[in-house]
Amino acid sequence: MSFNVLLVGAGEINFGSVEGPWNHTLRLERKLSSRLRVIALVDPDTARAKSALEGKLASGAAPSYTRCRIFPTITEAAAGLSADERPRLVIVGAPPFARGTDISGQDLELQLVQAFPDAALFVEKPISSGPVDASWRVAAELERRKTLVSVGYMLRYSAAVQKMKQILAHNNITVMGTNARFVMAYEYARKLPWWDKSRSGGPIIEQATHFCDLSRYFGGNIVLSSVSAHTVEHDEAPGQLSAKRFDEEVIPPEHRLPRLTSATWKYDGGAVGALTHAIALHGTTYDTEFEVYADGYRLKLVDPYNAPKLHVRRPGLAPEEVYSFENDDPFFGELATFIDAIEQRTDTSHVLSSYNDAVRTFEFTWQIRMVSDTSAKSERERRMTA
């Protein structure tokens, strides 16, 4: 029996790029094989959509796309699809400024549940770049409609992350603290909207969101009032970047990204968390680590996006244990798990990132952004009066 899928967004999230491992269509093809029937591709840039579709029709996956039609809007897709073309799954891979709120033009999820009330939604992270209160209203509407939703925090599905969870559960460990470090290689990041925090939300909301989500996954909910954050700004001496490949001058100064953000906070359960995000490295190789501390234990996850390794220190054991997970594909894991949940419907417990939970991560990243903006403003005023 065929499985109807509607794609929203013809960019790298759904179709891949040379810059990273995102490529949802590739995982759909692997999971569903000949059952996959992509019935529509929605993107206002119809030329880009046509190019993406032509690439698929020229590939070995062509049978899954032969009946795919291109629409510029959800409304036109709903009007143009027949009853047997209604999607079971919608992949929402449009940019975050187009989704996650109830504001007209930024409300893709609400448009989709109105047009296709029986479809499940897979929504990319972060859920939005708009106001948090609007995202909570979307969450309430999705819950009211009983829409099955999964959000793309794929690191939760990583075999390394699940190994960490197993170690904690098996040894009845209470987490004492978490420490996340994300150092970006920026030389080939040339998309102007990404460097404009009025459009992207900023590097914590848009990029470090995965590590903020991992922090919550291990530490629990955040005491938002406890968040403290400081930044190195673009106009400070340590913030001068020598390998930019674009003209940052076209972005208003107040909208330019901080080069480094350092944040700390308290968890509801008493543990403490920390995050450092830096735009600092040249080339293409990022430097990312995530640590969990507890009595007698230190779990350190290195390079979770590409070739994950987990270093484990246990009580009374030396040297530390090292586990490698190079062949793991958490992108496949999250989509495969969600498709299984759609087909079974009775058991959604393996869907690890619900929409409500993703809003909590979004709320947390916004808190870091707001507190760091306030800190930067105070520092700027201090320098002016010094």
Image: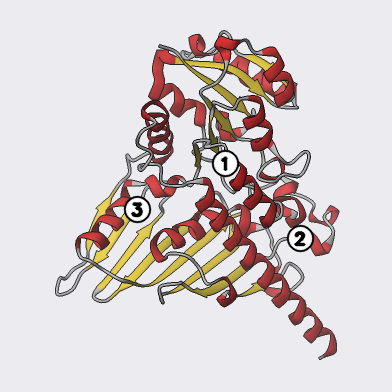
Judged from the image, the secondary structure of the residue bearing numbered disc 1 is helix
Question: Which residue was labeled with disc 2?
Answer: 256
Asked if marks 1 and 3 touch (Cβ < 8 Å), the reply is no
Identify the amino acid type marked 2: Arg
- Measure how far apart labels 1 and 3 are at the Cα level: 31 Å
Say which quadrant the N terminus sits in: top left
Q: Give the mark toward the camera: 2 or 3.
A: 3
Q: Nearer the viewer, residue 256 or 269?
A: 269
245 in relation to 34, above or below? below
Is 314 situated left or right of 283 in this image?
Answer: left
Asked if marks 2 and 3 touch (Cβ < 8 Å), the reply is no
In primary-sequence order, the first of circles 1 and 2 is 1
Q: Can residue 192 be seen in this snapshot?
A: yes
Residue 78 drawn at (x, y percent): 68, 19
Disc assigned to residue 161: 3
Question: Which residue was labeled with disc 1?
Answer: 144
- Residue furthest to the bottom: 386
Q: Give the colouring mode of the picture.
A: secondary structure
Q: Nearer the viewer, residue 334 or 132?
A: 132
The residue sitting at 70% across, 77% down in the picture is: 375
Residue 104 drawn at (x, y percent): 78, 40
Total marks drawn? 3
Q: Give the mark toward the camera: 1 or 3.
A: 1
Identify the amino acid type marked 1: Arg
Q: Residues within 10 Å of mark 3 (few under 14, many from 20)?
A: many
The residue sitting at 60% across, 13% down in the picture is: 68
In primary-sequence order, the first of circles 2 and 3 is 3
Is 291 situated left or right of 148 in this image?
Answer: left
